[in-house]
Amino acid sequence: MGKNEFCSGLEEKLREVNISAGDMIYVASDVRNFIYEIVSTYGAEYLDMAFGSLTDTLQDAVGEQGTILIPVFSWDFCRGKGFDYYRTQGEVGTYSNYVLNNRKDFRRTQHPMYSFMVWGRETDRLCGMSNQDAWGAASPFYYFMKNGGRQLEFDVESFRGLTFIHCIEQWVKVPYRHHKYFFGTYRGDNNETEIRCYSMYVRDLEVYEHTKTTHRYLMEHGAAAETVWNNNRLTVIDIAKCYEIVADDIVNNDGKNNLSFKDYEFHYHTKQTLPYEVSDIPE
C-alpha cells in the first residue's frame, strides 16, 4: 500500500496554499480526524504507515532544499523531572511523537521545553542552536520568523496551535510576563547528564490570559491562506506577517484582537509586574 492511498491529493492541496520546494514549514497538527479516517477505512494497524506517508508527503512538498519543523514540546524540565534528549516525549500530539520515535531522518533541537524534530536543509543550523532562552533571538523560533518560515496548521485553530503568539509577547515585552530561569537535569545527545539552566518568558500566575487569534483574522490581514483536504482544514501562516499584525495589535491596541484576559486589565505601556524568577536548583 503506497503513500497515495493514505495521502492522495494532499501535495496538490499544499500547492494551493503556496507550499513549494525550498520552503521552511512548522507543522502544528490535530490529527484526530486523520486518525479516524485511517482507522475506519484501513484499520488501526495501518496508522503508523499513514503517519509515515503524511511525513513523506510533507517532505516531497518542500523538497531537499526545504525544511520541516515538528514540535515535540515538553514541560517536564519545568516540573523538576529533567530532560532526556532521546527519551523525553512531547506533549503536543500523537503525530509529533510518531516522528520523534520513528523517523530517524529527523533530528531534535536542544531546548528542553521547546524542542522540534527537524528535517531538511536547515537541520544542522537549527539543531546546533544552544539557546538558553526558549523564544529569544538565538532560538529556532526567531530564526524561523526572520527567514521566511511559514506555519502549516493541520486541522487546528490558531488560538490552539500558534505558539508564536507567546513569542511575540516576549519580543514586544508585554508587562504581564517575565523571564523565569529553570534549573534541572539535562541528558543531551551525547548521553551525558548535567545540571543546566533554561528560561522561558512565563505569564504571571495571577494573570489569566488566553490567545484568541483566529485563522479568519490572519486571512483578513493577508497573513494566511487556507484550503481543505479530506475534511482536514489546512491553514498556512506567514510568520513574519503574523508578527507585524499581532505586534501592532498588542502595542497599539492592547491586544484586543488577539489576547483575552480574566480579571486583569491589560495596558501595554504599564510597568512590568515582575523582573524575573529563578527556580530551585537541584542538588
Image: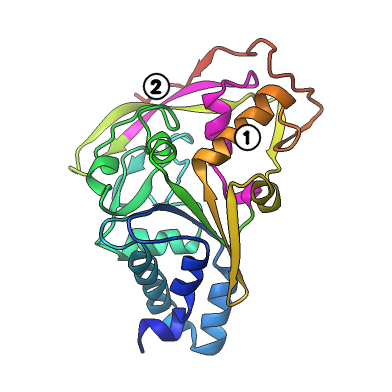
Task: Identify the magenta region.
Answer: 158-185
Disc 2 designates what residue? 281
**Which is more toward the observer, 262 or 14?**
14
Can you say whether 69 is above or below 12 in the image? above
Instruction: Judge whether residue 146 can be spotted in this image.
Output: yes
Residue 16 got which mark? none
Can you say whether 127 is above or below 86 in the image? above
Q: Is residue 136 magenta?
A: no
Residue at image location 45% in from the left, 82% down from the top = 6
Can you say whether 168 is above or below 268 in the image? below
Disc 1 designates what residue? 246
Taking the image as shown, residue 23 lies to the left or right of residue 236, namely left
Q: Position of residue 183 (x, y in %)?
A: 39, 26
Q: Position of residue 78 (x, y in %)?
A: 47, 34
- Tag 1: amino acid: Val
**Total marks in image:** 2
Q: Position of residue 190 (x, y in %)?
A: 17, 42
